[in-house]
Amino acid sequence: MREPSVWPITRLTRRLATWLRRDAAESAMDEEMRYHLECEIAAHVERGMSRADAERAALRDFGGVERHKEDARDTRGFTMLDDASRDVAYAARVLRRSPGFAAAVVLTFALGIGCTTTIFSLVHGILLRPLPYRSPGELVALWERNVSRNAARNVVSAASFEAWRDRSTAFDGMAAMVPAPRTIAGVPVERISAAQVSPSFFRVLGVRPALGRGFAPDDEANGGAHVAILSDGMWRARFGAHASVVGRPIVLDGESYTIIGVMPTGFEPPRFGWMSEQSLWIPFGVTPDNKSWGRFLHVIARRAPGVSVESAMADLKRVGAQLASESESNRGWSTNVVALGEQMTGEVRRPLIVVFAAVSLLLLMSVVNVATLVTSFARRRSHEIAVRRALGASASRLIRHQLAQSLLLGFLGALCGIGVALLGGPVLVALLPGDVPRVEAIRIDSTVLAFGVAIATATTVLFGVVAAMRSVSSPAGARVAARLGGFRLIVVEIAIGLVLSVLAALMVRSLVSLRSVDLGFETTSIVAGRVSLPGERYPDAERQRAFFGALLGAVRSMPGVTSASIATTRPFACCAPATVVVDAQRLDENAAGTTDVRFVDESYFATLRVPIIGGSVFAASELRDGPPRAVVTRSLARALWGAENPIGKRVSMKLFGTTVAEVIGVVGDLHLADARTAVRPAVFLSTARFASSERDIIVRGSADAAATLTAIRDALASLDASLPLYRATSLETAVDATIARDRFTAFLLSAFAVLALVLAAVGVYGVFSSDVSRRRREIGIRLALGAGRASVLALVLRRALAPTIAGVAIGAVAALGLARLMSAMLFGVTTSDPISFLAVGMTLILTAGVSTLVPAIRAARVTPVEVMKSDG
Amino acid sequence: MRDVDLLQGTLDLLILKALAAGPLHGWAIAKRIQSMSKDALTVNQGSLYPALYRMTERGLIVGEPGTSNEGRRITVYRPTAAGRRQLQQKIETWEAFATAMQHVIRYA
């Protein structure tokens, strides 16, 4: 048999186990003692006593069997455990008699524990859990950086990537990634978000396919072999999770690829920058062609053992210097190395921390409320407790009773709280905005449960001990202590209520500011969708132009369509080009910052209602050949030419090599990516002049979004039934999606603020309610002596004034400090926004006032006679 | 035979010493202590069994089921490794205590 250990925990568990099996233990003890007795008797008999004498002698020597058994039971801790279980049973009986009190405590407690645990599951799942890759701390994302253009994390050119990979010594593997949307043939034809990645991609991450093989180094030859690796999701959705999928062909954009592997379930590909969902991977290889494309790659790498981030940056700087001396396009560019974890979750870190701080305050408040409830309940039972004391119950006994009650309440509250978290967690995750990273793996796992249990235990002990200590003090002392304690609690509750409300108010105002940003174009009644023409049926510019022309014609003839246009990307779409645009003569690179480039048709500006400031926009019959013409935004014109008339001037940009275009018009500035960042200059070129097989169609319709999209799909189907319309959305939805995170944070903080206000109101009401009932006699006397009811009202309200003001003041100071955490999240609002603070302060005072008013009115209605009568 | 009121720790020491020679059941332990002390010390049942249960709980001894000569089900106790270590420690403590007492009585 294994040697039992002497650790206290094992001892305790052993004790508990024995107690639970007490019947067996009791009978064993019984037998042992009986056997002992018999041995004694036998020994006596052996020495010559008669049987009867032996028995008498043995029993006499043995002493009281029951007493020995009792002693034995005591040593085994049975007495203690028996007492404890009796205390708990008694506590349960008491609570059953006051279900309202029990329910209030359990619910308040469950609220605090449940909310905190749920938010912790978010914090744990997104921020605390390490990335699911081998040694994730070594992984970094690499960016190009251009200080003069204020681009700290710029996508990387193929040439830079190749140079870094081949010449840098700081990394143990480097891989490039680029989004590769492809149309996959089959049933149904779908446009999927695939990704092109270097063959070393999975090796760098340290994850192996579950089926088949990963990419081999020569899979990157010729720009990328035609092999593909499926994600687990795609494997299940489209290929029925059959293991035989390895080796089968699939057709992507008309080209045949062979499936060579499937990634395991639960593999989270790195999502950052433009890399969002990745349902399939195909190899990427650097070619002379894509080296001329400009900057478009995302790069991840694994730091070599012992290499720090700083040394990695220094090494890349060295390579970068070499590159700059070799090629013009690299001058002025350096690099940026960011830890992959920070890259993937950095944006949500601050909001999550703020929300967690807020919910922790809510937990504190719920504990304060529970403490108030428990102490007032104990005071209500003070008569019963006094009787018990008179009957001989010791102070320690009473404390034990109180503790048992608190523990029982805490246990029930914790159970309900964990239940709330288990139910509410998935609901909250479902409501999360789509761009929150690492959402797939958020769940209530053992760590989160352990956290919930830990905070439940800590808070139960906290209010249990406080309540137990309060319950045994003398009645007079208790009165004084309770009143002071109650008022102190009000201050705390109001302070916390103020802090949470300020945080919520700031976030809401920030959200409102964001939504009221003038985007430079109208979003109402506009929908957009994307069409991609497969190469084999639309191989040249002529056929592509013809198709889109026909599509526009068909859509414009649909009823309810006001105007339609095509563009390479609609506003607020991902992955659109940007470059530096300069005056063709002056060639001053630093005149304007990074400029967005869009290819649009003649009705783009009309459809989006972008104001035309000068000159004209593209004509319907824009020339296919000949010098390109451009429309610039106001900020670009001002940056390049100041107040001079830009019409007729020529701009040069690094696009398709170098393109020079003549400016024909100036339009108002527009936000093309999100409302938060400052407006960037933009230049528009004509879709007629620069053909493409992929276009967004942007349509303004008088009907609702769904109807207009159906109209577009019908028009599309009438031309070519095999083409899907994808990324179809209303422009309003697309714009809203960029502020979804802010909206969600504002929603959470507001919910907490509302809960806090309710708890504060309940707490204030409770404290003053009991205060008023305790002072009935005094009030009765005052009224009898001629005080008016109004003055009694004023008396009660006045008592609430000091703690309320104190609470507001303390809360305001705390809020000023805490709000600073939010400064990066706010838009158009400072962390000390006076309007928010004032509004919230008044709300809190009002809430406290109303909560005090009810008991105050009750006090004023007291008739002196019944007070005198009741006291006798 | 004299009944001496034994301190708890000393009783543990006696029980462990009694079991050092081999596993015994409750009554036999009491008899062993009596014989080891040349009849100077008797352990009464009221102290013995609580002590045995306490030491079992603390992991110093272990009670295993066994059968008596008559075929009765009995519990036989034997020391654990921790128990054996404790025995050594307790012996050292006792000897130090006894020496100190000697000094106080004889020389102080």
Image: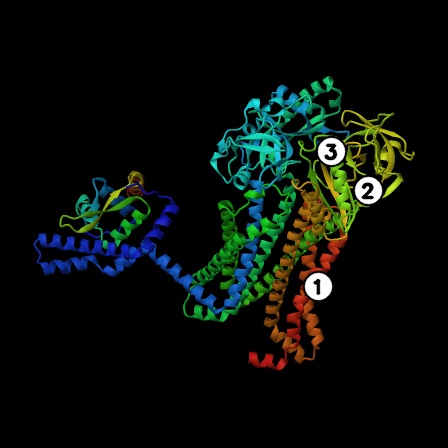
Viewer-nearest of labels 3 and 1? 3
- Disc 1 residue crowd, few under 14, some 14–19, many 20+, Cα 10 Å: some
Q: Quadrant of residue A109?
A: bottom right
Badge 1 amino acid: Leu
Residue A825 in view here: no
**Cα–Cα gap, marks 3 and 2:** 25 Å
Residue at numbered disc 1? A846
Viewer-nearest of labels 1 and 2? 2
SS of the residue under disc 3: helix
Q: Is residue A389 above or below residue A5?
A: below
SS of the residue under disc 2: helix
Residue at numbered disc 3? A543
Label 3: chain? A
Q: Is residue A687 above or below residue B78?
A: above
Label 1: chain? A
Residue at numbered disc 2? A605
Viewer-nearest of labels 3 and 2? 3
User: Do residues under tags 3 and 1 come within 8 Å of each other at their CB atoms?
Assistant: no
Q: Earlier in the sequence, mark 3 or mark 2?
A: 3
x, y percent for residue A152:
71, 32
- Disc 3 residue crowd, few under 14, some 14–19, many 20+, Cα 10 Å: some
Residue found 64% across the figure and 55% down from its top: A751
Residue found 34% across the figure and 42% down from its top: A5
Image quarter of the C terminus of chain A: bottom right
x, y percent for residue A139:
58, 30
SS of the residue under disc 1: helix
Q: Is residue A560 above or below residue A317?
A: below
**Cα–Cα gap, marks 3 and 1:** 70 Å
